[in-house]
Image (tube, rainbow, N blue to C red):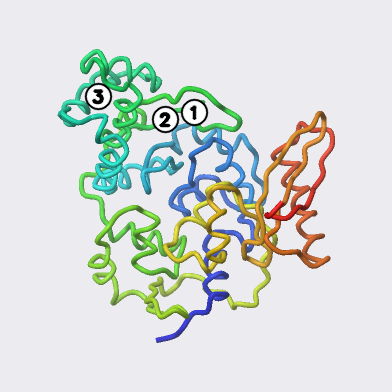
Amino acid sequence: MSVLTRRSLNRATLARQLLLRRAETSVLDVVGHLVGLQGQDPDPPYVGLWNRMSSFRLDDLTESLCQREIVRATLMRGTQHLVTAEDYRWLRPLLQPLLDRWQKGAFGKATAGIDLAELAAVARSALDGTTLTRPELGRVLTERWPGRDPVALARSVQGLLPVVHPPPDGTWGRRGRTPFALADQWLDRPLTDAPSARDLVTRYLAAFGPASVQDVQAWSGLTRLREVVDSLRPGLLVFRSEAGRELFDLPDAPRPEPDVPAPVRFLAALDNVVLAHADRTRMMTDEQRQHVGVEAAVTVDGFVRGLWKITRDGHTASLVVRLFTPLSTVDEEDVVREGLRLLRFAAADAENHDVRFRSVSD
């Protein structure tokens, strides 16, 4: 059984994630290939697509959301994701066990004594043929259950009932109350009756492999996937990590040589490439992991080297890069070059752009 080094896993993951070379394809194709983009906040998915596409415009994603080709909803790990409409139809029912646990863990105390099936039914009736914001839905639900927390009731619906959050929710720069719509009505087609966990595993491997069973579970939030992976084993390649963990992959998936160059990338906040593995050492150290996910990461030679954010001061937009360790002169120049590209995309309205370096310890 071949051993894949940390660097080999890094390059394979970057290739699957379209982070070695920007793709010349559509937003719909990229979001579908990645099995969604983490979308807790509206702007990061746009940055994630900018990183992966050779000619991405803000309107490209916004139009796909407005045309109902891509939807925003609570999915993997009980977090907000942007996925294609077709993927939503099978992902949402497949993830129901996870979402049941998510509702119980987050809002179980607030909904104690309430029949959750009735809660879902009342919410469906309220949303039938219309769109309500989360506060509006909460007020409807507290009419049936007075004295209960309206936020907890409305947010519970995200786990109990297939709902999506239509635009302008999830669009660039948008802040406001989250709208709710019934998924089958918004998509004008039903959800899949018998979704396949085998499809989940193979789609994950295509986007994130090679990977372990624990990695698939960490990304999806589902448990007990060992049996599913074992059923696919005859058609998969099997490797081991340097730590001895069993890794699975699709036979025809790209696995570049470990010395393939990897360009600087300013990853979106909560980008799945840094969240979607139980063992994240292919991208970062354990010490760096404590920061990544809370803050957006910058990679140099494919590995996390710092954190970034954009600040404003009058007419100037600054990209502040906080490094874990100093960079070489060449790497620093590459970071500045890519950073200015990011500023021209994400802060196009600013008259001046600059890149500043600091230490993470500052």
Q: How would you rate the neighbour count of disc 1 (Cα within 10 Å): few for under 14, some for 14-19, many for 20 or more? A: many
Residue 16 horizontal/vertical position (percent)? 52, 63
Q: Which residue is drawn at 79% across and 48% down?
A: 355
Residue annotated with mark 1:
169
Position of 45 relative to 292 (above/below) = above
Q: Residues within 10 Å of mark 3 (few under 14, many from 20)?
A: some
Considering depth in this image, is 313 or 61 the residue closer to the camera? 313
Q: Is mark 3 on a helix, strand or loop?
A: helix
Q: Is mark 1 on a helix, strand or loop?
A: loop
Give the answer, above or below, for where 145 lies relative to 27: above
Q: Do the residues under discs 1 and 2 have CB atoms within 8 angstroms? A: yes
List the residue tagged with mark 2.
165
The residue furthest top is: 143
* Left or right: 95, with 56 as reference point: left
Instruction: Please state which of residues 211 and 327 is positioned toward the viewer in this rendering.
Output: 327
Residue type, numbered disc 1: Asp
Q: Mark 3 points at which residue?
A: 124
Q: Is residue 207 above or below residue 346?
A: below
The amino acid type, in three-letter code, at marker 2 is His
Q: Rounded to the nearest whole Å, what is the CA distance between mark 1 and mark 2?
A: 6 Å
